[in-house]
Image (spheres, rainbow, N blue to C red):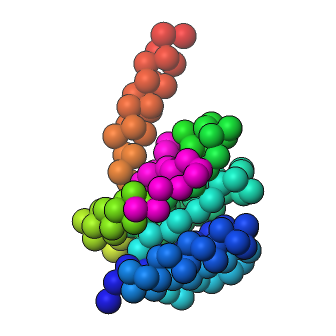
Amino acid sequence: MGITILIIERDSMLQEHLVRYLKADDWRIFNSRQQKDIKRILKKHPIDVVLMSLNDLKKEGMALIKMIKKKHPAVQVITVNSGDQISLSIEGMKLGVFDDFLMPLDLDSLILRIREAFQAKKEVKVIKPSLLQRCQELMVAASFAEAGEADIAKELLTKGLNSKENIKNSLHNEKNERRKK
């Protein structure tokens, strides 16, 4: 089976054109304009690549990219943008967007990048922590919270024990600052 793509585009004519053009490659295409449908599609179907237009979405598009990368880190996102909103393109790249295209689209280049994004998705290894690891993280975070170190507890809960070295360093720095006083 081919690549599964989710197209997020509010301009219905452009969306229909993209769907028609991409279906020629026998890819499975989903499209949506509303955030609740996007979440449902991502949860229900194994999406490989998201093709998202930022022209109408603007900051809402950034929130969608964050959500996609958090809940489905292997899914590759390609954005489409107009030349007058380059700041959104840059912000998207910082969030992990695979590529950004400017309007007007070069559809052959877009297809090539979709194929490359699909390959990149297959190479991404998402390692989920075991239940035991997650319980350990929760217990450590609870200990810090109980000791009055809510910031450290929050960092542990959001970033996991991978940030353990950062936390050790920050605790060490705090102790040194207290000694200086």
The one of 96 and 28 positioned closer to us in this rendering: 28
Specify whether residue 68 is in view: yes
Q: Position of residue 52 (x, y in %)?
A: 58, 62
Indicate the quadrant containing the C terminus: top left, top right, bottom left or bottom right: top right
**Is residue 63 visible to us here?**
no
- Which residue sits at x=39%, y=86%? 26
The magenta segment is 92-108
Identify the residue shown where x is 62% and y is 40%.
83
Viewer-proximal residue among 144 and 133: 133
Where is residue 103? Give x, y as percent. 59, 50
Residue at (41, 74) in percent of width and height: 48
Who is closer to the viewer here, 161 or 178?
161
Q: Quadrant of the N terminus?
A: bottom left
135 left or right, relative to 123 = right
Residue 45 locus on image (x, y percent): 49, 86
Residue ranking furthest to the top: 180
Placement of 62 over or under 83, stated as above or below: below
* Point 37% across, 46% down: residue: 164
Residue 145 located within the stretch drawn in magenta: no
Q: Quadrant of residue 61?
A: bottom right
User: Is residue 127 found left or right of 80 in the rendered image?
Assistant: left
Q: Position of residue 56 (x, y in %)?
A: 74, 56
Count all numbered tags in the image, as a single digit.
0
> Can you say whether 71 is above or below 141 in the image?
below
Q: Is residue 77 left or right of residue 133?
A: right
